[in-house]
Image: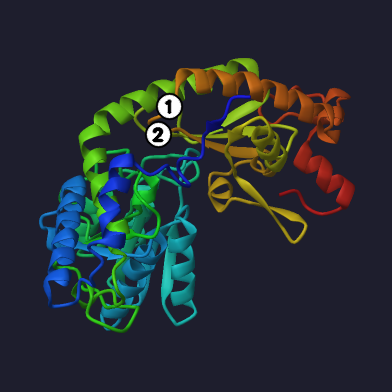
Amino acid sequence: MRHVYLDHQAATPLLPEAFEAMKPFFTEWFGNPSSLHEHGLRVREALKRSREQMAALIHAGSPDEIFFTSDGTESANLAIKGVAYANERRGKHLVVCATEHPSVINSVEFLEKQGWTCTRVGVDAEGRLRLHELKEAITPQTVLVAVHHVNHDIGTIQPVAEVGRICSDKGVPLYVDCEASAGWLPIDVEAWGAALVSFSPHRFYGPKGVGVLYRNKKARLVSIIHGGVQEGGRRAGTENVPAIVGAGVAAEVARMDLDARIAHTRELQARLWDGLEKHVGFIKLNGPRPGPDRISTNLNISTEFIEGEGQLLLCDLNGIAVASGSSCVSKSLKISHVLAAIGLDHALAQGNIIMTLGRDTSVEDVDYVVQTFVRIVEKLRGMSPMWDEFQRGIIDSVIRPTGRGKSFSQHAADVSGKPAH
């Protein structure tokens, strides 16, 4: 059985050269970077080199604008809460895209409980931010606009440069979540006019346990973790030196290999979607089609009449690692807020999985996935009451309606007596 890893957005294997660079900082160069002796100095120099590598990856003006945290979630929390607290005398209003990552959404909800207000800007059917709504949402009390570069669920690339111009005209700082794009797409924080940008190196072949936050020197930011004066007083706590060193190497390799990575994954993405679309009936791609509006690593698909968890489990049993776009919470299926925001039918949202490609994914891997997924869908539909009811004309397809029956959502509402989703 072939083993194919298609969950690169969750984690990537560590680059061998990054691993080698990390090793001495576990056993030989183990000093604390805050120490004043030679051991501390050697480690501080290593952190300085990593800041330079991170700054080069995102075209930051200075390595001093790079701060290290424990991961992308902490970086998002620091960006949102740190800016909000630093500017609360000016106002207590935030603007975010409705399809942000949970680390952003939950940080905002935390602030809302403390008296801040937030406007969530909608997206179109392919997940693109509605720029006219963004302009209207910003008020004199707005202290931060938060958007993502690439959507973590459906791969949509947002018009960040245009958002940056709007924020500049309004005099409001812009925070960009680059979790899904760093190491896979060009990032230019100065061209965007971004005040803050965050990302995690473990998504582009660096180690886990380190996050990055870029902060323009003009952006006001207060710490949310209190203790020592590490990271310029913005993030207390001893730095994870081995992980930071490995992350710097991964950033340098990503910068040099970026064009090749994009070309490779773009070809495989098109091949994978073409194969699935051709050989699997009643399947839908969520987000833009492969091309300039979608990151080259991501395919988010809904397969009608079967659920995502079943697809994920059978994929795993056949050696294919994917992510499911839905989760079972309190015995009821809770769909992704991203899929809800783009207006995807509830039944299709439940049949959702995410496949993400990497630099080591091969043509043979993609062909195996297509061949295997066809069999998985056939097996699951053979056990599916929804597929049986579709075959008998009781319910109809959302993807390709036949006119023979009701939609699954309407049928379920009729049976339960509750309104359709």
Q: Position of residue 258 (x, y in %)?
A: 26, 34
Separation (CA) of disc 2 from disc 1: 6 Å
Query: Is residue 249 in view?
Result: yes
Q: Residue furthest top?
A: 278
Identify the residue at image location x=32%, y=47%: 19
Q: Identify residue type, mark 2.
A: Arg
Task: Examine the rendered structure and indicate whether residue 340 appears above or below residue 278.
Answer: below
Q: Identify residue type, mark 1.
A: Pro
Q: Position of residue 319 (x, y in %)?
A: 62, 31
Task: Examine the rendered structure and indicate whether residue 244 appears above or below residue 6.
Answer: below
Report the residue marked by disc 2.
294
Identify the residue at image location x=32%, y=38%: 184
Q: Residue furthest front?
A: 28
Could you tell me which quadrant the N terminus lies in?
Answer: top right
* Relative horizontal placement of residue 190, taking residue 372 as reference (left or right): left
CB atoms of marks 2 and 1 within 8 Å: yes
| Mark carried by residue 290 | 1
Q: Position of residue 359 (x, y in %)?
A: 38, 31
* Relative horizontal placement of residue 406, taking residue 256 as reference (left or right): right
* Relative horizontal placement of residue 373, taking residue 417 as reference (left or right): left
Of residues 311 and 250, the one drawn nearer to the viewer in this rendering: 250
Q: How many marks?
A: 2
Which quarter of the figure has residue 314? top right
Query: Is residue 87 in view?
Result: no
Say which element carries label 2.
loop
Task: Examine the rendered structure and indicate whether residue 316 appears above or below residue 19.
Answer: above
